[in-house]
Image: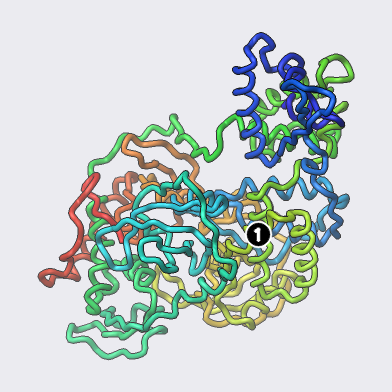
Amino acid sequence: MNLVIALLGSQYGRSREFLRTRIQGYDPKVSDEAFGRMFERDKVHLKRLGIPISAVRDPYAEDENSWKYLIRPEDYRLPEIRLKPEGLAVLSLAARVWEQASLGSAAARALRKLETVAGTEAAGAGPAMESRIRTKEPAFDALWDALLHHRRVSFSYRKSQDVAAGPRHVEPWGLGNRYGQWYLSGRDVSRGEQRLYRLSRIASDVTIDPGAGFAPPVDYDNAEALDSLGTGPQSEAVLEVPAGRGQLLRELASGAVPAPRPGWDTLTVPYREPELLADDLASMGPAVVVLAPAALRDAVVRRLSGAATAAGAPLPTVDFSIPATPVRHKPPGEDRLRRLLDLVPYLVQNSGIEAATVAEEFGISRKQLDEDLALLSVCGLPGYQHGELIDVQWDEGVVFIRDADELAKPLRLTQEEACALLVGLESLQSLPDEAGKETLREVLDSVRRVAGPDAWMADVVEARIAPETSLETLSILQRAVMGRGRVRITYLVRGRDDVTERVIEPMRIYSLDSLWYVEAWCTLSEGMRNFRMDGIRTAVAAPGTAPVRELQLESKGPARMSSPGVFMPEAGDLKVVLALDPDARWVADAYGARARAALPDGRTAVRITVGRAQTVPALMARLGGGGQVLEPEELRKASGDWLARALAGYPLPGAGQGAPSPGRRGKPDRL
């Protein structure tokens, strides 16, 4: 921190001798060689944060001190950006796209910096539509880093419907989200051609080649690569479902006839993505039996078998008093320095702000904030006397800062921050909101100018979030949100396989990955509910105006504006404890886990709440062995029985042949 202030506050630069002897934090007694190693380490450290140190030769000196070092203000400080209040609101919406993803902190930092230099406040009215994208796949962060630095990667990959995984060596060209899944596009080095890889099928850690990089093709089109998904040959699934059940499958079916088994029907359902269909069919359990094709049938059996094996595994001991250690993608010291450099301009812009508000903004405890402010108070220009040190006061719960001119302007957007914000903005272009398109284009142009050469990353990372519903239905719901209207809908309740009619009072529309929801007060249930947009069969405006409901503004459920999720907890919901594999930890965020604990075998125990017990066995089947019900005991047994009934529908010899042998905890490998 002191090195940054000294080099940023120097017009002509500082010599190595000056830095060694005058910068607080360096030991002036160490040898020149030892200091050189420390200085080079710090230069690399600062470069990772987007702070380049320039070297200028002094023509009047002849020894090692002939080189002077400085940080040029134009290389450090974020340029001013002029945005209307509506533009800042759009920026906020774009940043929140990543709120539940590993890029969430980068997007939040970028938004805070731009708000500091924008010279205006965001519009007060919240948006009618919001989107969230998760990066739940363990491979995402390593692939992001490799893409950023043009490095080859190696990993084990399991192709669709294959059991065994094989090695892959890839030059990453782009990342994209479609159908709620992340895909890597790049050149398969061994095969010498471009391929797409679904991140959830990567069966190992991603190894980044530290050697020489590669040059991606100049004509690469990430959108074109994503468009190739779902264009393969269409297949047909032959399914048996109980008569009168399987409403969604019946809507998709191209044919339906009575089955040989009394009380069942045989459906023919077209599909293109076998894994996505296998997930859905497995989650239906005993309510469907796959007859053909054999590959789809085996894929469903593997999921059910994996879930059943996990259900019967020994129960681990869970101690929620020892929380799970959060995954760190950056060294702790780097995290803190980044936060301190962001903290100073934020405090300069918001002098007299309450300390509790600052801690909440930066996602830290009040104790950590006190430690950060205490550290800032001993940082400053060389000399470190009164007037040279940063003057920070935080008496009586409010924070004031003075003598911080060198750091008063925010640090430029890093490549990661610029990309996170730009990809979020680009994803909003797929929303059917014509009224806001002009503002969105203006904000995109402004952020691209500020990002400069670092904007390239946003061209090779794409997230598609367009809602899969009719524009008419979406328009009716949007108008209801904006005008406090009421809507009469017919709705398919998937868990009960039942179509209901109800009147709702929509509060907002939001997405999580590829699924879109409308959050509304349901007059039938007399409570707040989340309705999947693809479950709404009809929607018409209903007479009357929705009353203002203060309760929904006070709710702290995970599906609120600050952190939307799939589940909205209510009093009386069932508390459930699950053990989750690393690639199934997204369940904790989706269901607003109230507690997490690390388990000795590498899994994470979470405590969630669910509205209906039937949700849990369906979720376990979808996870295919990646989750285990621990509590309550009745639900654990009921889930095992449900899975056993589902597997009983596949009695043919060899139905599950090809399923892998049990591995850790007896759990088979998954697709």
Q: Compared to 604, does 344 lie above or below?
A: above
* Left or right: residue 147 compared with residue 131: left
The C terminus is located in which quarter? bottom left
For the residue pair 501 and 456, the one nearer the viewer reads as 456
Q: Which residue ends up furthest to the top in the rendered image?
A: 29
Kindly indicate the quadrant of the structure image that contains residue 445.
bottom right
Q: Could you say which is closer to the camera, residue 358 or residue 661?
A: 661
Residue 518, placed above or below residue 330: below
Give the crowd class for mark 1: few <14, some 14-19, many >=20 residues within 10 Å: some
- Residue kind at label 1, given as amino acid type: Trp
Residue at image x 59%, y 50%? Answer: 103
Query: Looking at the image, which residue is at 87% across and 26% down?
Result: 403
Q: Residue 248 occupies which quadrant of the picture? A: bottom left
Residue at mark 1: 456
For image coordinates 61% across by 71% down, the residue present is: 504
Horizontal side of residue 401 vs 363, given as left or right: right
List x then y, in percent, for residue 488.
Answer: 60, 78
Report which quarter residue 432 is drawn in.
bottom right
Decide if residue 556 is on the left or right side of residue 389: left
The answer, for residue 523, to whether it is visible in the render is no
Q: Is residue 518 left or right of residue 671?
A: right
Q: Position of residue 279 (x, y in %)?
A: 35, 66
Q: Is residue 273 above or below residue 21?
A: below
Vertical order, 385 against 361 (above or below): above
Can residue 213 be seen from the camera position used here? yes
Q: Which of 431/256 is in front?
A: 431
Could you say where residue 182 lies in the image, as x and y percent from the top left?
48, 62
Q: Decide which of 381, 534 is in the foreground and name it.
A: 381
Instruction: Tell me which residue sits at (37%, 53%) in the image.
Output: 155
Q: Secondary structure at mark 1?
A: helix
